[in-house]
Image (tube, rainbow, N blue to C red):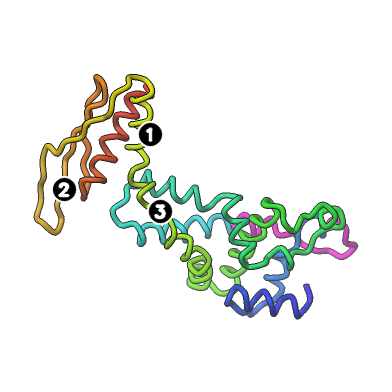
């Protein structure tokens, strides 16, 4: 990796490496290493570590960003963010493909724009920042990359997802619409818990949450679980 390329990439990611060799390793694809007479390491071990660091950081960001969302929904949202397609898009925003060292075959087949190569390189880059600067540096880097994505994330879809799926299912199967009603509230005004009952055809279930919408989501999810049995 040339000095100029390294300088441009460090400016793009807003992090300066103390040990440039770690960054160089993160951008060495196996196809490049296999063609070299020199003893080089590919980025696969860093990719492995980066996957774990990235999952932890995204989980932390989601916990802070969506304080009232249940664990199951947080897991679903994290899976939608930490996947090959999304990571490749983040890598493209950094123009990471221009800096990856690839073998001749991958260069000829447009490897710099392949989702799999870009996603793997991004995970390796996260690990490189972590190895070079520690968890705080890695956390800040990932937060910069995913902050705009979290800001755009339409949580209405996340909150209403189970309700939408339940409505689609019962309308398709039975030509009816689920009916929700509040059956109770508890706790002080600043920390209230709502209890909601939903009836869908011949099934009923109760859900609870810190808002009416979250309670409805919980109840809808339980009906869906009944329907899947």
Query: Tags 2 and 3 in contact by the CB under 8 Å rule?
Result: no
Of the residues under marks 1 and 3, which one precedes in the sequence? 3
Q: Is residue 55 above or below residue 5?
A: above
Q: Position of residue 159 (x, y in %)?
A: 33, 46
Q: Quadrant of the N terminus?
A: bottom right
- The residue sitting at 29% across, 34% down in the picture is 220
- Measure the C-alpha gap from mark 1 to mark 3: 17 Å
| Residue 193 numbered mark, or none | 2
Q: Quadrant of the C terminus?
A: top left
**Residue occupying image coordinates x 25% and y 35%:** 219
Please say whether residue 40 is one of the residues in the magenta stretch. Answer: yes
Crowd rating for badge 3 (residues with CA inside 10 Å; few <14, some 14–19, many 20+): few
Q: Which residue is mark 3?
A: 154
Please tell me how crowded label 2 is: few (under 14), some (14-19), or many (20+) other residues with Cα within 10 Å: some
Q: Label 2 to label 1, Cα distance in Å? A: 24 Å
Q: Which quarter of the figure has residue 174?
A: top left
Q: Position of residue 8 (x, y in %)?
A: 69, 77
Q: Earlier in the sequence, mark 2 or mark 3?
A: 3
Upstream in sequence: badge 2 or badge 1: 1
- Nearer the observer, disc 2 or disc 3? 3
């Amino acid at each position: 990796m040339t000095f100029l390329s390294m300088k441009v990439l460090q400016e793009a990611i807003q992090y300066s490496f103390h040990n440039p060799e770690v960054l160089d390793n993160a951008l060495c694809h196996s196809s490049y290493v296999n063609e070299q007479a020199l003893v080089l390491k590919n980025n696969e071990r860093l990719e492995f570590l980066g996957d774990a660091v990235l999952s932890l950081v995204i989980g932390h960001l989601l916990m802070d960003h969506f304080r009232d969302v249940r664990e199951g929904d947080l897991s679903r949202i994290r899976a939608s963010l930490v996947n090959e397609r999304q990571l490749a898009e983040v890598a493209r925003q950094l123009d990471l493909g221009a800096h990856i060292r690839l073998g001749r075959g991958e260069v000829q087949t447009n490897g710099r724009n392949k989702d799999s190569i870009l996603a793997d390189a991004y995970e390796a880059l996260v690990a490189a920042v972590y190895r070079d600067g520690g968890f705080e540096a890695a956390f800040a880097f990932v937060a910069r990359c995913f902050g705009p994505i979290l800001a755009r994330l339409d949580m209405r879809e996340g909150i209403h997802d189970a309700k939408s799926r339940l409505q689609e299912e019962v309308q398709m199967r039975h030509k009816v619409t689920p009916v929700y009603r509040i059956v109770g509230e508890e706790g002080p005004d600043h920390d209230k818990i709502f209890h909601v009952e939903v009836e869908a055809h011949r099934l009923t279930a109760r859900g609870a949450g810190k808002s009416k919408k979250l309670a409805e989501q919980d109840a809808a999810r339980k009906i869906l679980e009944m329907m899947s049995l």
